Image: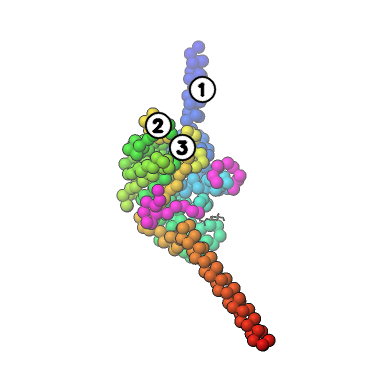
Amino acid sequence: MKMWIVVFLAAFVAGASAQSCSCETMKWATCDGTPCTCFVMVDEGVKQPLNCSTLIPKCFLMKAEMYRAKKGLSTRTIGGKPDESAFVDNDGIYDPQCENDGKFKAKQCNNTEECWCVNSAGVRRTDKGDKNLVCDKLVETFWVRLQLTHKPVTTPVTAANLKAAIADAIHKRYKNFNKDLVQEVEYDPEARLIVVDVKKAKGERKSDLSNMAYYMEKDVKVLPLFKNQDKFSPQVGSQNLEMENILVYYVDEEPPTFTMKNLSGGIIAVIVVVVLAVVAGLLVLFFARKRSQRYNKAQQREMENM
Ligand SMILES: *[C@@H]1O[C@H](CO)[C@@H](O)[C@H](O)[C@H]1NC(C)=O
Ligand SMILES: *[C@@H]1O[C@H](CO)[C@@H](O)[C@H](O)[C@H]1NC(C)=O
């Protein structure tokens, strides 16, 4: 009888520990052994060890996504500016070069000879150049603006309620992310638009805004990166807000050095209109001249007949 209890208990303990050997912060991780260790494949035969008690660095996540896309595995991936120098990620995902600790290398190249410099969020902040391009350091992103749209609600919410709710949700969901960094929340009820400014002091190197923002981007746009597939849904009063859209702006400690970064859609449209107007003007001139030539010829003929 006693032996049975021991066997039963042993089985129970083994089952429990097997169950706890999994990676809460990365659903694609493989975990094994005692003590439990986890890794994610980032290239053919390359296992990236993970610390699953914290958010996985974005650089590793992007590598894992690229690898999965290559292997045909499922990834389900594919306000306005907070500051004059803010920019969004227009390039999307690439296969990045990571440091051992998961930081992005300052210089990234796109397998070809094309290279560019990135910020600490891995987002391009310079023009693309050739492989001789020099990026002297990784410039830190100290401010991200998250522009979220929420699904319709039954009871109206207010900006003040939202701020506390969102700061709490971020703190809980993204592994104790410092909620004091959620500095400002603006709200437009008509557009269901929530603008969240997450900002740290320049020079601060403890909090990583980019990992948090990346997890949130995936939470809203695709599916959570977490093992647990619960949605990101801050509780405001008695209701849970579901998000349906997100746009992330990055502000770096030093402004980016794109050329023509202001050549936005609006300006391009103006240029197109001006070019069309000039072409139309030239056509009018051309036909007018032709007509006057014909008129002159006709006059000449009349003169000759006379
Ligand atoms: C994993 O991350 C946690 C939280 O940041 C940290 O306390 C711990 O030391 C890390 N473990 C390893 C093995 O690096
Ligand atoms: C890298 O190359 C891929 C295709 O080769 C392209 O889709 C992507 O936009 C490029 N990324 C950058 C940052 O140039």
SS at badge 3: loop
Q: Residues within 10 Å of mark 2 (few under 14, many from 20)?
A: few
Is residue 212 something that shows in the picture? no
Identify the residue at image location x=46%, y=52%.
Answer: 89
Q: What secondary structure predominates along the stretch shown in magenta?
A: loop
Q: Residues within 10 Å of mark 1 (few under 14, many from 20)?
A: few
Give the residues in magenta: 70-91
Q: Which residue is mark 3?
A: 151
SS at badge 2: loop
Identify the residue at image location x=55%, y=48%.
Answer: 66
Q: Which label number is shown at residue 118?
A: none
In primary-sequence order, the first of circles 3 and 1 is 1
- Residue 293 place in picture, x, y as percent: 61, 80
SS at badge 1: helix
Q: Which label number is shown at residue 155?
A: 2
- Residue 40 place in picture, x, y as percent: 52, 42
Q: Which residue is mark 1?
A: 11
In primary-sequence order, the first of circles 2 and 1 is 1
Identify the residue at image location x=32%, y=38%.
Answer: 160
Q: Residue furthest right?
A: 305
Give the amino acid type for the residue marked by disc 3 in the picture. Lys
Q: Nearer the viewer, mark 2 or mark 1?
A: 2
